[in-house]
Image (tube, rainbow, N blue to C red):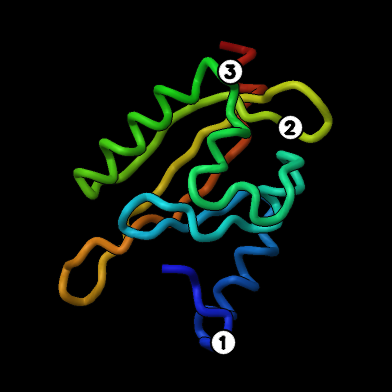
Amino acid sequence: MKPDPHNLGERRFLELIDTASHPTWITDSTGYCTYLNEAWYRITGQQPGEGEGFGWLNALHPDDRAEVEADFCESSRMEAFYCIEYRLKVASGGYRWHMDMATPRFDDGGNFLGYVGNVIDIHDRRLTE
């Protein structure tokens, strides 16, 4: 389900996450990415809307895509916290290491709604390791 920009609460939430300096995303219960904030598009160079669905995988390093997709699908199946590190293509060229963490969302009846996640640049940390 796509966020409803006409709903005041959702509109305020989207305004808040669009001001975040790091990428933030939302999925529905099937894992379909329904929203990526402005930071995602600024950092990756993808065009607005391009990362929705499973298009966000195209911004990952080709060697990381299969593992990230498998881990994401398994976490979704289990309705569990999700955390993985991968290389993300950046608009300035090349790839940088990022950590992607997501919290599952549930409605009042305990039904899984999908995820809200954050992508954090950890490139410098990875290089020192």
N-terminal label among 3 and 1: 1
Q: Quadrant of residue 95?
A: top right
Q: Position of residue 39 (x, y in %)?
A: 70, 51
Measuring 17% from the left and 68% from the top, which residue is drawn there?
110
Q: Position of residue 12 (x, y in %)?
A: 59, 80
Which SS class for mark 1?
A: loop
Q: Is residue 83 above or below residue 8?
A: above
Crowdedness of circle 1 by 10 Å Cα count: few (<14), some, many (20+)?
A: few
Amino acid on which disc 1 is placed: His
Measuring 34% from the left and 29% from the top, which residue is drawn there?
70
Q: Mark 3 points at which residue?
A: 126
Q: Where is the N terminus found, in terms of image quarters?
A: bottom left
Q: Mark 2 points at which residue?
A: 90
Which SS class for mark 2?
A: loop
Residue 5 left/right relative to 65:
right
Closer to the camera: disc 2 or disc 3? 2
> Number of numbered discs present?
3
- Disc 2 from disc 3: Cα separation: 16 Å
The answer to whether the residue labelled 3 contacts the one labelled 1, judged by CB atoms less than 8 Å apart, is no
Amino acid on which disc 3 is placed: Arg
Q: Is residue 31 above or below residue 65?
A: below
Q: Is residue 37 above or below residue 93?
A: below
Residue found at the far right of this picture? 92
Q: Where is residue 13 in the image (x, y as percent from the top left)?
A: 55, 74
N-terminal label among 2 and 3: 2
Residue 15 left/right relative to 110:
right
Q: Quadrant of residue 98?
A: top right
N-terminal label among 2 and 1: 1
Front residue of this view, candidates 98 and 6: 6
Q: Which mark is residue 108?
A: none
Front residue of this view, candidates 114 and 49: 49
Q: Mark 1 points at which residue?
A: 6
